Amino acid sequence: MARVLTGIQSSGRQHLGNILGAILPAIEMSNDPKNEAYLFIADLHSLTTVKDAKQRKDNLIATAAAWLACGLNPNKVVFYAQSHLPECTELTWYLNCFTPYPMLANAHSFKDKSNNLSDVNAGLFDYPVLMASDILLYDADIVPVGKDQKQHLEITRDLASSFNHQYGDTFVLPESKISESVMTIPGTDGRKMSKSYGNVVDVFLPKKQLKKQVMGIQTDSTPLEDPKDPNTCNVFALYKLLATDEQAKQLAEKYRGGNFGYGHAKTALLELILEEFGSAREKFDHYIENPEEVFSALKMGAEKARPVAQATLNRVRNKLGF
Ligand code: ADP
Ligand code: TRP
């Protein structure tokens, strides 16, 4: 049995790109009986950028609600909020004292932001050590992450192996699992769907607002009567991701046949989203209206995670003579 652990940034509402690119693959991985899955919401990391308390809490609820609504089973997965286990911040301090300064100064995530140093707080600089602590605290074997997190995993392994070398076996050395093959979901403007580009489809929005997003997908100006190429159309690209092969084939035929406008295609996409995510949308609304259910799921996860965290911390404290 491999312990597979990954962290999710609590950056608020989860869009279709997050759902298809991260949430559903992680839930699938957690359903593999060979894995023991730890999935947590990295809300301490969010403090490096989000300073507003209400926003942080709302982000935590919305992120957890999206995962639960998409099918994460909190009885099976150890699902928790990073901040509910302060053991993580204690381990971060110990690791900090073994982290060479240049290792952090050379991290891409810091370098990208360091041209404006007055905006950089020490938390942002230390971000990779908090992440190492997330991983080492729970003896993770495998850590699935995107390519952008690869260097953070290398830092984690370096810290763990140099500590083990100095004090004897203490930490499990985690392997990263970089998902090169995960498809990039296009946004409403054809670029990668991302909160930072404002081009998302948020399937959890009320129907009227969701419709506005779908109707706003950029298309070319081919007149309604003319045949159209489905393979160059953003609407079709999204439709294809959710449809069966037969549904996609039928819509492609309508594109090619002419007298089928982009408005019609957008309506077909909206209907498919409402059908595919109907039950997830209901569950999401339920969790947003009953946040205590979200907190009780996270509390259950924290209770399962705590003994593992405490055992690791005890090993570390003993080694360090505390
Ligand atoms: P955003 O770009 O909206 O800020 P994040 O960087 O918070 O999204 O990504 C959270 C997770 O969702 C990551 O695992 C990331 O790989 C995945 N993800 C985000 N956008 C997409 C997309 N357009 N296609 C596929 N996966 C995505
Ligand atoms: N930094 C990761 C990201 O931006 C989130 C994260 C925090 C994480 N701690 C982690 C991922 C530990 C994997 C393991 O996506």
Image (spheres, rainbow, N blue to C red):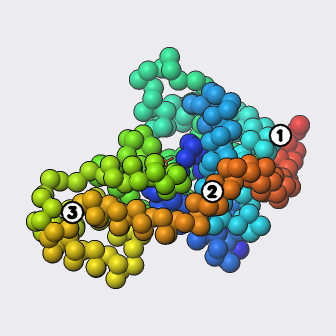
Foreground tag (3 vs 2): 3
Q: Quadrant of residue 319?
A: top right
Foreground tag (1 vs 2): 2
**Three-letter code, disc 3:** Gly
Can see residue 42? no
Can see residue 322? yes
Q: Which residue is mark 3?
A: 261
- The reply, left or right, for residue 205 in relation to residue 139 is left
Q: Position of residue 141 (x, y in %)?
A: 66, 63
Alpha-carbon distance for marks 1 and 2?
45 Å
Q: Which residue is mark 2?
A: 284
**Three-letter code, disc 2:** Phe
- The reply, left or right, for residue 113 in relation to residue 128 is left
From this viewpoint, which residue is outermost toward the bottom?
246
Foreground tag (1 vs 3): 3
User: Residue at position x 42%, y 66% from top?
Assistant: 271
Q: Is residue 232 above or below residue 127?
A: below
Q: Position of residue 145 (x, y in %)?
A: 53, 56
Quadrant for the C terminus in the image: top right
- The reply, left or right, for residue 41 in relation to residue 267 is right
- Check whether the beta carbons of the residues at disc 1 and disc 2 lie within 8 A of each other: no
Q: Which residue is mark 1?
A: 320
